[in-house]
Amino acid sequence: MKILISGEHGQVSRELQLRLATVGELVVLGRDQLNLAQPEQIRQQVQRVRPDLIINAAAHTAVDQAESEPELAFAINAIGPGVMAEEASKLGIPLIHYSTDYVFDGRKSAPYNEADATNPLSVYGQSKLAGEQAITQVQGQHLVLRTSWVYSTHGRNFLLTMQRLLQEKPEMRIVADQIGAPTWAGTIASSTVALIERWQAGDAGAWGTYHLTAQGETSWFGFAQAIGEALREHGKSCSTLRPIPSIDYPTPAARPLNSRLDCSRLQCEWGVSQADWQTAFRECIAGQA
């Protein structure tokens, strides 16, 4: 099986490359070869590679930066994935695409399920929702997997930023009223592999949109506490943490206060579930040592 992966150096892409190496032949195309802001390049590359499966692991993920460059964010997060879905449909192959909790406004008091109304607060969230809609309109075989608070031991993410700052500063003020599930990129990749194996075995669930995050919940402050505890366990220094409300940490893009996603549909339809965020975090940290 030939698998085309868009995005070469991103958090999820790197974990996918590790886990899919034995599943099929990987064709990994970075931005220089497959730029999602260039529809014709997408068409040419898909037609050239003629894969059996496409995984779109590329995206414009600079949430605050997207506020000042909405056209680029929509080109990469909305128009590009739609073109990719069209090309996958022409070949009669599935497309796996990753989306985000930012498609919701965070005002619901319980975890969001796939049937809940979307209402993104930011350009990033709006562009990702538009990408979901573009894929869905093609009506081909697709999995849109919404995840949240992605981190890993490479790239730019909350884990690596906190590991550095907690050792540099005497005190850190961290937002404590945004709730969600920190999700290791390795968890996303492993679940993706499980979904592919189900499909290959003829045991696929329904195509469509699903939620895929680690189990459990915490705040950014709680996640920072876990990172600090891990640093101390390894004999490293750690600054004092102070919880603050979101209003005390203004950002160009608004964030949902509730980013919790109900992942039970993925378990019911595909038989794929995820570990709790603490277990995945410890596994991630163990691999970093």
Image (tube, rainbow, N blue to C red):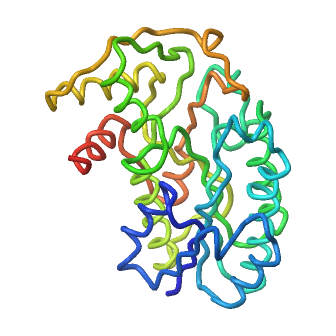
Q: In the image shown, does 8 or 97 lie closer to the viewer?
A: 8
Q: In the image shown, does 208 or 191 lie closer to the viewer?
A: 191
Residue drawn at x 37%, y 68% as measured from the top left:
19
Residue drawn at x 66%, y 26% as measured from the top left:
256
Q: Position of residue 122 (x, y in %)?
A: 77, 34
Decide if residue 198 is on the left or right side of residue 56.
Answer: left
Residue drawn at x 59%, y 84% as measured from the top left:
52
Decide if residue 52 is on the left or right side of residue 79.
Answer: left
Q: In the image shown, does 3 or 76 lie closer to the viewer?
A: 76
Q: Position of residue 219 (x, y in %)?
A: 48, 22
73 is higher (above) or lower (below) than 205 = above
Q: How many marks?
A: 0
Q: Position of residue 29 (x, y in %)?
A: 58, 75
Residue occupying the far front of the picture: 168
Quadrant for residue 166, please give it: top left
Decide if residue 242 is on the left or right side of residue 167.
Answer: right
Residue drawn at x 52%, y 74% as measured from the top left:
199
133 is higher (above) or lower (below) than 166 = below
215 is higher (above) or lower (below) than 105 = below
269 is higher (above) or lower (below) than 24 = above
Decide if residue 213 is on the left or right side of residue 153.
Answer: right
Quadrant for residue 7, please give it: bottom right
